[in-house]
Image (spheres, coloured by chain):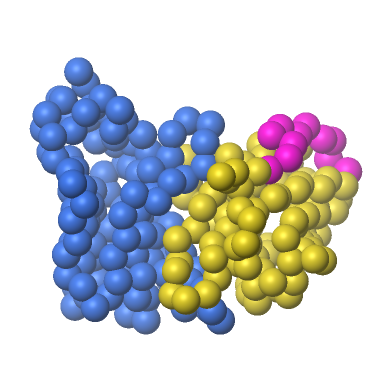
């Protein structure tokens, strides 16, 4: 079956602009996660959804970052007033979200470059 | 919060040799420890995981050990092959609601020379 997909695969924007990054999780997965991975680093947790609600948003760095999952499937990560330090790979993952199955399946990521 | 240290940052071995990657964590409440393999341009892929009530787990050429008292865990790959070359990440996970939120190490770049 299809894995986690993310669009766009690459995004170049200018400082101060607004960007939206999309994630399509594996069908039937109720949990969805966003991470940010800087060069040479491990993924850093941003936010986790269980269904439509954000169950844990403790990793969002500031109020310029926001994510939604209105129908409990597709999610969008939104970044306002982008800064050069926001340049990174943004990874999305999904998991079944119940029954003790914790395995997270990652998408290929969106590479964001802020000029 | 949780802090995960991972060593070495780079590991170069000959095909057929074993490779060992070590991680330590700081929060004794962490109770789920996945290991991920990441190839260039791709997202991380789970290769093995271990829970805090288990000391060792093996899956073919890959094994993971966990020492809760010392707060460290290790990945062992035997009979390495060139296709094992990738970046490997350990993670220590804390329970959050109905899921686990991992804190990742900085990664180990494994290079297997044919």
Residue A38 percent coordinates (x, y): 56, 44
The picture's colour for chain B is blue
What span is colored magenta in the figure?
A6-17
Residue lying at the far front in this picture: please name it. Answer: A1
Q: From this viewpoint, is residue A26 visible?
A: yes
Q: Which of the image's four quarters has the C terminus of chain A? A: top right
Instruction: Tell me if residue B96 comes above or below residue A23 in the rendering.
Output: below
Q: Is residue B107 visible?
A: no
Residue A3 position by quadrant: top right
**Residue drawn at x 80%, y 66% as measured from the top left:** A71
Left or right of residue A94: residue A85? right
Residue at image point 64% right, 56% down = A27
Tell me residue A88's x, y (percent).
Answer: 63, 42
Q: Nearer the viewer, residue B95 or A69?
A: A69
Q: Is residue B74 magenta?
A: no
* Farthest-out residue, top: B114
Looking at the picture, tell me which residue is in the foreground, A25 or A55. Answer: A25
The residue lying toward the viewer, choosing from B3 and B78, is B78
At horizontal 36% and vertical 70% (from top left) the residue drawn is B32
- Can you give x and y, in whole percent of width and height, for residue B40 in the image? 47, 30
Q: In the figure, is residue B37 to the left or right of B50?
A: right
Q: Residue at x 59, y 43 (%)?
A: A2
Give chain A's shade.
Answer: yellow
Residue B27 left/right relative to A12: left
Rendered location of residue A21, percent (x, y): 76, 47
On screen, A78 above or below A13? below
Q: Is residue B81 above or below residue A24?
A: above
For the N terminus of chain A, the quadrant is: top right
Quadrant in the rendering for residue B110: top left
Q: Nearer the viewer, residue A29 or B27?
A: A29
Image quarter of residue B90: bottom left
Q: How many marks?
A: 0
């Amino acid at each position: 079956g299809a894995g986690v997909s993310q669009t766009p695969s690459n995004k170049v924007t200018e400082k101060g602009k607004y960007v939206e990054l999309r994630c399509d999780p594996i069908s039937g997965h109720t949990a969805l996660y966003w991470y940010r991975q800087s060069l040479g680093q491990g993924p850093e947790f941003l936010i986790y959804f269980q269904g439509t609600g954000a169950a844990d948003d403790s990793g969002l760095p500031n109020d310029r970052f926001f994510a939604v999952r209105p129908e409990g499937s597709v999610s969008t990560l939104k970044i306002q007033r982008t800064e050069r330090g926001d340049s990174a790979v943004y990874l999305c993952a999904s998991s079944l979200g119940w029954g003790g199955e914790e395995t997270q399946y990652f998408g290929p990521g969106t590479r964001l470059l802020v000029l | 919060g949780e802090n995960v240290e991972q060593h070495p940052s780079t590991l170069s071995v000959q095909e057929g040799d074993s490779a060992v990657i070590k991680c330590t964590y700081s929060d004794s409440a962490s109770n789920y420890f996945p290991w991920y393999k990441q190839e260039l341009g791709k997202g991380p892929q789970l290769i093995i995981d271990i829970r805090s009530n288990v000391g060792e787990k093996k899956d073919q050429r890959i094994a993971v050990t966990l020492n809760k008292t010392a707060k460290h865990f290790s990945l062992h790959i035997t009979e390495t092959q060139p296709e094992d070359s990738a970046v490997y990440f350990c993670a220590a996970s804390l329970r959050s609601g109905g899921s686990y939120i991992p804190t990742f190490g900085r990664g180990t770049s494994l290079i297997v020379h044919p």
